[in-house]
Amino acid sequence: MVEVLRCDGMFLKGIRVLDFSRVLVGPLASMMLADLGAEVIKIEPPEGDETRYWAPIIDGESGYFMSFNRNKKSIAIDLKKDKGREIVYKLIKISDVVIENFREGVPEKLGIDYKTLKEIKPDIIYCSIRGFGSGSPYESRPLYDVLVQAKSGLMDLHTIDNNPPIRVAFALFDVIAGLIASNAILSALVSRSLTREGAHIEVSLFDSAIFGLSYIAESFLLTGKVPRYRYSEHPSIVPYQAFKCRDGKWIAVAVTHDKFWANFCKALGLEELIDDPRFRTNPDRVKNREILIKILEEKFMLRSRDEWVKILDSYDVPNAPVLSLDEVFKDAHVVSSGIVQEVYHKGLGRKVPLLAPPLKIRGERPRIESAPPKLGQDVFEILQMLGYSDEKIRELLEEKVVYYR
């Protein structure tokens, strides 16, 4: 873990974002904006974002919540109360972006829908993130990661024989949808700077999943054939997968063109396969996949994983060891890159490791300015900014209009 010098490329400094979203996709979108310098105020219900209670819990703080809520301020407001909505409306007047991922119809019930907020701030940029999106026959249904992986076809693509469907270990499509949302918001900010007009953006989690299938979906649309995967194999490239080594560990290789094929054969001591008509070109290798993979599986069992990494590197063959997470965070790149930063966490009273933005600006990785906030920790700062006195804030706390934990 490294301490990183402050980066001066805070392009969104002066932009204020009100984030009503929870769980993953919306918080990730707002976090990306916060990483670029925006002031993000996370507006939570009295009980807080539900991920505050998701495992793993470390000294009362959720590791899941920490993953998507750095560089934000928190205020907890009961939006069902008039005084709570009054606070929000005051914030809207001085804000630029709203992000929400409520179920269809909920924003209207809470009085924070686009139509209502646009009357208060005509140039507001309002991003709605929905499971399926307006107009969908499923628009009122909730959608979570395991459901979108199932319904998008991703689980079926990785189902082998009669084994149970496999879920990708993390919420892949939530991450994709969050990045799409932040990208759309940035585009709207650029447009507003030219036209002075706001926008209502809607991002569908399910549409993002279908979009994320990319070339797999396009291949099906063009051929009508459903591709099948076995473990790490690729349907269009061979060899492009992981192989087990003598020490029980695995190595992945990516032989994407004939130059690498020749180098690969030399590295494995299989020069006779370079011009073998069964394997000479990639289409040949795909056609004769089963024969070739059997040969390669036997060969890789002759050496350990790390031995093969050195050999393949020396022959310029794209490869990577299949690492466990404890190995990942000891990797030379990860250690030296600054992707893990330590930040003081008020709730824990100590520094915690957090994943930094995966980018550099003017050669420097942006610094994480603050750890994920405690529920309502910025209530005094935010309400004082709106002109509330300390006495009035204490009244709102006693009336349970706002909350602090």
Image (cartoon, rainbow, N blue to C red):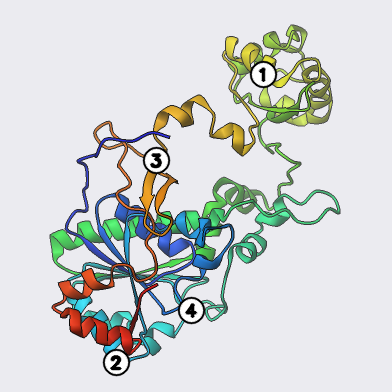
Residue type at mark 2 is Asp
SS type, badge 4 = loop
Q: Residue at label 4?
A: 103
Distance from disc 1 to disc 4, alpha carbons, whole Å, reads 49 Å
Earlier in the chain: of badge 2 and badge 3, it is 2
Earlier in the chain: of badge 1 and badge 2, it is 2
In the foreground, 98 or 148: 98
SS type, badge 1 = helix
In the foreground, 188 or 341: 341
Residue occupying the point 26% across, 35% down: 5
Q: Residue 29: horizontal and vertical position, in percent? A: 39, 58
Residue occupying the point 24% across, 52% down: 37
Earlier in the chain: of badge 1 and badge 4, it is 4
Earlier in the chain: of badge 4 and badge 3, it is 4
Q: Residue at label 2?
A: 82
Residues at circles 4 and 2 in contact by the CB criterion of under 8 Å? no
* Local crowd size for mark 2, using a 10 Å CA cut-off: few (<14), some (14–19), many (≥20): few
Distance from disc 3 to disc 1, alpha carbons, whole Å, reads 28 Å
Q: Is residue 390 above or below residue 192?
A: below
The nearer-to-camera label among 4 and 3 is 3
The nearer-to-camera label among 3 and 1 is 3
Distance from disc 4 to disc 2, alpha carbons, whole Å, reads 21 Å
Residue occupying the point 76% across, 56% down: 165
Q: Residue 391: horizontal and vertical position, in percent? A: 19, 83
Residue type at mark 3 is Gln
Left or right: 168, with 272 as reference point:
left
Left or right: 139, with 167 as reference point:
left
Q: Residue at label 1?
A: 306
